[in-house]
Image: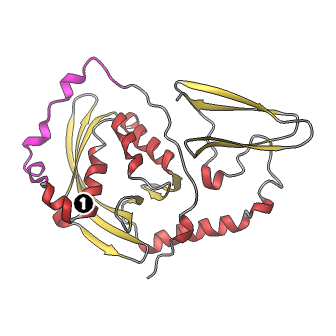
Amino acid sequence: MRLYFAFLLLSCNFLLVGQRSTKGSNDAIYDSKWYEDDSDYKTKTNSTVRIFNRPYDLLQRYYDNFSSPEVTRLNSEFYADAIIIHHDKKMISKQEALERDYDDFFINNIKSYQILVKPYSMVTNQYDEVDIVRVPVMYYVTKTNGKRSKFELDLTVVLDKSNTKIYAIGRDITVDKLNVVLNNLERNQKRNEPTNRTRNISHGQSPYSYCYGSENECNYSCSKISVKASYNSDVIVIIKKSDSVYRNAFISKGRTYEFNLPNG
């Protein structure tokens, strides 16, 4: 089955938001590398396999960044600008995927992950536009209370043809599931053609939420930008940094709208 992927390659860019500090006084207690003595972890493959197995190389580098909440931010390198499936969420931005990875540590009281990709059990199915990789992944989890656990999950990861970007990640992802999500996106885009995009939009709404998201929240180290539209016409304001769209909003004529942004 051909996976129709072209319309996913939108000109959408998303910006990484600020970081929160999680360092505490008891960090040293939980930093001992207990997983290195595990028989499974000792099978972590040498660099030779990384050279000849590109999906493995990308995924192991991706999972190495789950050693702490802050380090997950480095996965901006591996996520595509738009993620079709990110575990239980569909069609989200790179920024939202990074926030979900970061927040997972605090939601589940995780101190750190050490995650081992098993290259010899990987199966890669190649399609015209993407590679779909099915891979077992071993998790070594240290909780904030010092408890440790080990478990294995079978995951599916959808990569671009160069095996440098992740389009989808989760369990039991199939071509049919991908096409359902993408077809829904295409239908939604057709219902929101450019000529109709602002016809029924209200003050403060995001006219390009389908592409750039509609977020305007900031909880830590924030700045505010107030924009007042002229009394003659409505305006659409787009805030960018390094060619990445970070906020977008429709402002009715004569009214003011306040954007909330992380510092930096």
Residue 136 location, quadrant: bottom left
- Judge the density around disc 1: few (<14), some (14-19), many (≥20) Cα neighbours within 10 Å: many
- Residue at (20%, 28%) from the top-left corner? 30
Name the residue beneath numbered marker 1.
56
Counting from the top left corner in percent of width and height, residue 256 is at 80, 31
* Residue 152 counted in the magenta span: no
In the image, 202: left or right of 162? right
Residue drawn 23% across and 66% down?
122
- Relative to 58, 101 lies left or right: right
State the residue in front, 90 or 55. Answer: 55
39 and 2: which is toward the camera: 2
Percent of width and height locating residue 211: 61, 55
- Which region of the structure is painted magenta? 22-44
Instruction: Name above or below for residue 82 compared with residue 252.
Output: below
162 on left or right of 153: right
Quarter of the image for residue 72 reads top left
Residue 77 versus residue 254 in the image, above or below: below
What is the quadrant of the N terminus in the image? bottom left
On the image, the x and y values in percent for residue 129 come to 43, 73
Inspect the image, locate mark 1, and give the three-letter code of the amino acid beneath it. Answer: Tyr
Residue pushed farthest bottom?
1
**Is residue 35 on the magenta stretch?**
yes
How far across and down, in percent of the image, does residue 91 sit? Answer: 53, 58
> Which residue is pictured at 14% across the width and 35% down the height?
33
